[in-house]
Amino acid sequence: MAKDKIVQNMEVIGADGVHVGTVAGVANGRIRLAKRDSGEGQHKGHTHFVDLGLVADVEGQRVRLSANAAVAVTFEEEQSGKPV
């Protein structure tokens, strides 16, 4: 996995091709997703993170995760590292 290929504004998709988020940055072994992709309710409007260990491939301007989107979002973390 080439984390150095992951850059801001790339689309993050699940293994099934479904949109999970947009890269806001990469730091400390995690992808920081743009706030606009942070979900609904209490999770809306703040940053979520995806561990780089879930990245299967970088395909052009897309980061493909190893899990389908519905499963991948269950692995999202808060900034503190706690599950969403």
Image (cartoon, grey):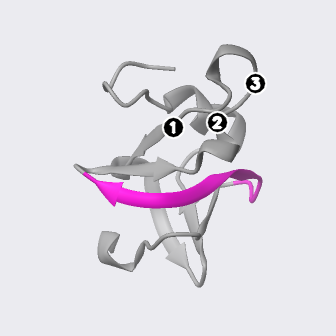
Q: Residues at badges 2 and 1 in contact (C-beta under 8 Å)?
A: yes
- The answer to which image quadrant residue 22 occupies is bottom right
Q: Is residue 50 left or right of residue 63?
A: left
The reply to whether residue 65 is visible in this rendering is yes
- Magenta segment range? 16-27
The reply to whether residue 14 is visible in this rendering is no
**Disc 2/disc 1 C-alpha distance (Å):** 6 Å
The residue at the far bottom in this view is 60
Q: Where in the figure is residue 25, as x and y percent of width and height? A: 41, 60
**Which amino acid type is marked by label 1?**
Thr
Magenta region, main secondary structure: strand
- Secondary structure of residue under mark 3: loop
Residue at x 33%, y 74% (from the top left corner): 2
What residue is shown with label 3?
Answer: 40
Q: Is residue 25 magenta?
A: yes
Reply above or below: 23 against 1: above
Residue at x 77%, y 53% (from the top left corner): 18
Q: Is residue 41 magenta?
A: no
Residue at x 45%, y 43% (from the top left corner): 50
**Which amino acid type is marked by label 2?**
Ser
Given residues 37 and 61, the one toward you in this image is 37
